[in-house]
Amino acid sequence: MAPTSSTTTSGAGTASGPGAFAVPGSGDGRSAGVGARLRAGFGLLGPRHPRHTLSVDQVDALSLPIGDDGVVVGVNTEGLPAVLGVNRPTPYDIVLIGGLWTAQVLALRAAATGARVAVETGRAAAWMPMVHAMGGGQNGLAVHDVGRVPPQGASAGTPVLVVRDCGMRPPRGRVASAPWQSVLTLLPYLSPVAPRLMRQARLVGVQRVSPDEATEIGRVIGLPRPELESLPSLPDGVTLWCTERDRQYVMTQPTDPETGLLGMARRMD
């Protein structure tokens, strides 16, 4: 809506006319004054304030300090928060070629935003400390064997993140991405199924890999040479996140509780 020459806001006017009434039995000035400040069904009027007027020239100065909506996965090269929107009204597939530590931090932070996290894994013991720390699976995170993830019933009110930690050759999952249900597939290294998964994904994260793996990843997702050559030397905790049109290096820095639960950032498990 285009701004007008001025924007004004004010409180309601003085109660009068059919909407006002006198307190029954009020005969003195004090009671009449109270009655004059009552409106049927609304009670006492609030305090009166002067009008606030904004000129057209001042409209552009208005702003709301709100950034992107989602999970803060770390900071970018400029030191600004990098946000991953996992709760979406459309199916969203993510592939992370990296370490378990990063996937677990993402799962923790997604649960902290109110999403339910379902982990499909062949190494449940690696996830159980998180389950116990979050209340035994009753507070947003549950672990399932490979191929045993039940339907999650995702909705706008209860979004879901499915984390598939099924090794280098994950089988086709029973639970796929859907509206309000994103799927994060963790691959420890490049595998024969990785090119297919990367092509299908809306977002690909790559941590430190070998030069040969970097060359293949660059071919599949079309990385420029500078990014391709950086992959074998990425520090622990750094991920190159890639979409079809954008690429961003992100360093995931654990909070103190995350460090106590998961340890420091590491590529190898």
Image (cartoon, rainbow, N blue to C red):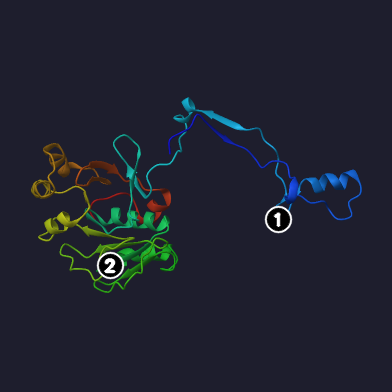
Report the residue marked by disc 2.
Answer: 120
- What amino acid type is highlighted by mark number 2? Glu
Return the residue found at the far top: 57
Report the residue marked by disc 1.
Answer: 41
Q: Position of residue 150 (x, y in %)?
A: 31, 73
| Residue drawn where x is 16% and y is 58% of the image | 197
Residue mark closest to the camera, 1 vs 2: 1
Front residue of this view, candidates 261 and 66: 66
Location of residue 245 with respect to 194 vertically, above or below: above
- What amino acid type is highlighted by mark number 1? Gly
Q: Position of residue 209 (x, y in %)?
A: 15, 49
Q: How many marks?
A: 2
Q: Quadrant of residue 25?
A: bottom right
Location of residue 53 with respect to 139 vertically, above or below: above
| Residue drawn where x is 34% and y is 53% of the image | 263
Q: Which type of secondary structure does the marked residue at label 1 adopt?
A: loop
Mark 2 nearby-residue class (10 Å; few <14, some 14–19, many ≥20):
many
Location of residue 88 with respect to 219 vertically, above or below: below
Q: Position of residue 86 (x, y in %)?
A: 33, 54
Front residue of this view, candidates 150 and 14: 14
